[in-house]
Amino acid sequence: MAPQKPVVVVSRKLPEVVETRLMELFDTRLNRDDKPMNAAELKSALKHADVFVPTVTDRITREVLAEAGGQCRLIASFGTGVDHIDLAAARERGIAVTNTPGVLTEDTADMTMALVLAVSRRLCEGERLVRTGKWGGWGPMAMLGHRLGGKRLGIIGMGRIGTALARRARGFGLSIHYHNRRRVHPELERGLEATYWQSLDQMLAHMDIISVNCPHTPATYHLLSARRLKLLCKHAVVVNTSRGEVIDEGALAQMLIGGEIAGAGLDVFEHEPAINPKLIDLPNVVLLPHMGSATVEGRVDMGEKVIINIKTFWDGHTPPDRVLEIES
Ligand code: 8YV
């Protein structure tokens, strides 16, 4: 008798090629209308699934996990961040967790660089001017932004994405500075001519541009607190393509309103999809709908990783992207 296929429940609509393969390999239940699941639907999914495939929009809390049936063995998340899953509660229930690291690194670094450029060179302001028919023609003092070359970029979190951003930023003539839990390998540091700042406070006070590229963990929640944001220079720009929770969004909005920093480029928000209303009307802020990794190629690669993780796990091996509890 052929071994039983695992019941795989997928929480959102994924690329067709990924869904087709999931259907071929497993007893897969798709979410064809792509409506995000509420807590009751998540509980029901975990009650019936052997494997659950959530995304960042699914809050897999301890309470949700408490409803998981004994058959539920794996949460194969479609995404890199795992802050939407209570990892400790999953482990206590014997449920393994995997994610999809690596395949969205370059796309997210591209988008981070795009935000750095957009804010510094006032891309969206210029675009709005043209679209609203308010452009009166070229002027020597019109739409002046700031040159990137020669400026200092401070990267918070020198992991895969932080490193990929540093490589790009060097091409634009930015000098690389970083703060990380651990100093990176000397060879990498040399290659990027990167300066390590053990003190985040010190780094913040000396940078022209700050990019948040660390994951959201209990230790990084509001890492850029009101106090730390106050350390930034008046001309500083902040970009975030990681997680909104790393920045105190209210304090950031207040500083932008008060002209205490020059601008911000945000792809992620503290209470997505809600956005602090104070940010909406600010001209010096570029706001994107969490689209840092949103490429067709990236989504297919993520799906491929999910499939490999499920298949490997179900065949009795350690899946390549098993997430262990992250350090707080
Ligand atoms: C993904 C992300 O689009 O992977 C992540 O951590 O933040 C995003 O770029 C999202 O997670 C998909 O679930």
Image: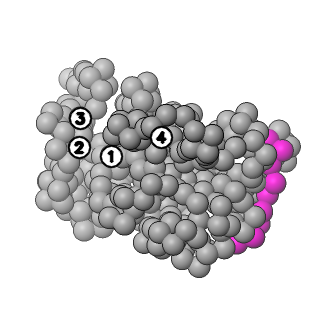
Q: Residues within 10 Å of mark 4 (few under 14, many from 20)?
A: some
10 Å neighbourhood of mark 2: few (<14), some, or many (≥20)? many
Query: Which mark is on residue 11?
Result: 2
Q: Is residue 328 left or right of residue 65?
A: right
SS label for mark 1: loop
Q: Is residue 100 magenta?
A: no
The residue closer to the viewer here, 184 or 140, is 140
Earlier in the chain: of badge 1 and badge 2, it is 2
In-front residue for pair 204/108: 204
Q: CA distance from mark 1 to mark 2?
A: 7 Å
Q: CA distance from mark 4 to mark 2?
A: 39 Å
Q: Nearer the viewer, mark 4 or mark 2?
A: 4
Q: Which residue is mark 4?
A: 126
Q: Residue 30, relative to residue 43: is it above or below?
A: above
Q: CA distance from mark 3 to mark 2?
A: 7 Å
Nearest the camera: 77 or 240?
240
